Structures are given as C-alpha cells and as structure tokens.
Amino acid sequence: MRKVVVLMVAITLGLTTAVSAKKLPTTAAKLPADFKQEIAKQLDYPKYAKDNLIEGEVWMKVTLDENSEVRIIEMNATNPHLGDYVKKELSNKKIENVNFPLGHVYYMKVNFDLL
C-alpha cells in the first residue's frame, strides 16, 4: 500500500511539473554580446562578497518583457548569496535603447572571480 501512495505522489508531482513547464518560453538562445554588455552594466562585484572572499557562478535564462525590463525565468548559482544579489540587481531593470526582440529567452552566465 505504501508503494502505491509513493508512486501516486511521484506521478502527481511529475504532472504538475509538466503543466507548469508549458508556461515557460520556448528554448533559450545564446545571449547576444551587446545584450550581455547591457546587463553587465547593472552588476558589480558585491562588497560583502569581496570582503568575505566569496566567488561563484550564476547561470540564468533571461528575457525582456514588453516594457524592456529584464525578467529572470530560471536561475542556478554556486553560491546562493551571489544568486540573490543578481536577482535583486536585475529584477525590473529596464534596458534602454535596445534592438533585441522582446520575449526571446537567452542563456547567461555571470562569473564572480577574485583575482
């Protein structure tokens, strides 16, 4: 009986994931260099990370919405503090004078390395 309950929970979670995944934009493309530069202007190495010798990488899927604001669709970070910093800095940031198609999804990686 316990195996049946576990199986039903696994199937339910699988169906929930499949349904919510349909709401995400389609496949992501490599981020154009000029778009990457515009986003990079919004990010500095956080002071607390420098002071505590924190390094890491943040991987994201990003898009521009109809107001030319950056939207993070998905994010993974080797250090959660750096991920939170990037999310805070990029959330609702407007990218001015862009010629990028709105709604396209791009992959982006941000490195935080102390040299």
Image (spheres, rainbow, N blue to C red):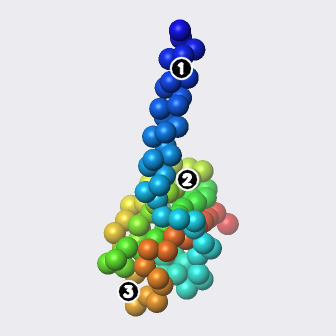
Mark 1 = which residue? 6
Quarter occupied by residue 33: bottom right
Q: Amino acid at mark 1?
A: Val
Residue shown at 55% from the left, 71% from the top: 106
Alpha carbon separation for disc pair 3 and 1: 50 Å
What secondary structure is marked by label 2? Answer: strand
Locate residue 111, reporting x and y percent.
61, 64
Alpha carbon separation for disc pair 2 and 1: 28 Å
Mark 3 = which residue? 96
Discs 2/1, front: 1
Locate residue 16, reporting x and y percent.
45, 40
Mark 2 = which residue? 76
Quarter occupied by residue 3: top right
How crowded is the residue under tag 2: few (<14 C-alpha within 10 Å), some, or many (20+)? some
Q: Quadrant of the C terminus?
A: bottom right
Q: Earlier in the sequence, mark 2 or mark 3?
A: 2
Q: Amino acid at mark 2?
A: Asn
What secondary structure is marked by label 3? Answer: loop
Residue shown at 48% from the left, 84% from the top: 100
**Residue 111, numbered label:** none
Q: Is residue 11 above or below residue 74?
A: above
What secondary structure is marked by label 1? Answer: helix
